[in-house]
Image (cartoon, helix red, strand yellow):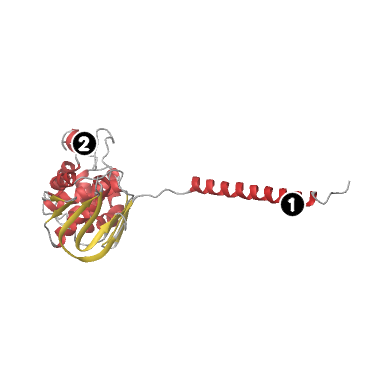
Amino acid sequence: MPRTPQEAPRRRRWRVIVTLLVVGLVYAGYVGVRGLLAVPHSETCVATADGGSAELTPEQTSNAAVITGVAVRRGLPTRAATIAIATAMQESKLRNLRFGDRDSVGLFQQRPSQGWGTEAQILDPVYASGAFFDVLVKVKDYETRPLTEVAQQVQRSAYPTAYARHEAEARALAAGLTGVAPATLSCDLDPPAKPGTTAAIVTALAAHTELTGRAADGAVSVEAAGATAWSVASWAVAHADALGITAVRVADHTWSREDGTWIVTPAHAGVTISVSAA
């Protein structure tokens, strides 16, 4: 049966409509699959110094900062912090574990039954770090002997050579966190889930470093210079995720969550640690 003159345009319109629908469905499917396959942003902290590099989670970095803070306030050399961080990397992956082999717990997997302290004490990273350093400083020539030998003498581990594998990473972290290598530790973080408080920063700063911070106008200022100032600044970046810190300013550099790294800014006295407004 021959087509009428009106049927040809009608068929062409339907073909166009069907084609548009197919294209739309294909595009919608592409967008949906891309959304499902998209890799979420991963919060990371990176330290690169002294011939080594380390990439850690914010939790691991904050624990490394606590260890280093205890070393600094005791006046111990950067090497002491390096040994302690490498040990904690091997024992717990720099996590404050509530479990372990037999009764081992904490950053260094110390055992209450071996005289390291009570379980509650060992689960306090400040206490655990201090207990580690109490033994470390009694090890003869700990600053010059191979790291894994010294760590093993403190820990008495079943794997005496395992600590060596973490030395380069530990050196990078210790150099940045002690302040001897400025602007070498930074964290790439999401916006804070909730606003931080200056009171929490002042409390943590005192507990970890025994330094006094002065809170005013949504920021905490610390009077310090040189390596000490950079140690405080690196400590703040390492704790930015946990404490809701949004920016840290020291010397002629500023770190912010927005940038995720240190950028050069006008010179600044002391250290200023900022939080977002509630």
Q: Residues within 10 Å of mark 1 (few under 14, many from 20)?
A: few
Q: How many marks?
A: 2
Q: Residue furthest right?
A: 1
Instruction: Give the secondary structure at mark 2.
Output: loop
Q: Nearer the viewer, mark 1 or mark 2?
A: 1
Image position, residue 239 (x, y; %): 24, 49
Camera-side residue: 60 or 90?
A: 60
Residue underneath mark 1: 12
Q: Is residue 40 left or right of residue 153?
A: right
First in residue order: circle 1 vs circle 2:
1
Q: Amino acid at mark 1?
A: Arg
Image position, residue 195 (x, y; %): 26, 45
Q: Is residue 207 left or right of residue 175?
A: left
Q: Quadrant of the C terminus?
A: top left
Q: Is residue 27 left or right of residue 7?
A: left
Image position, residue 159 (x, y; %): 29, 45
Residue underneath mark 2: 111
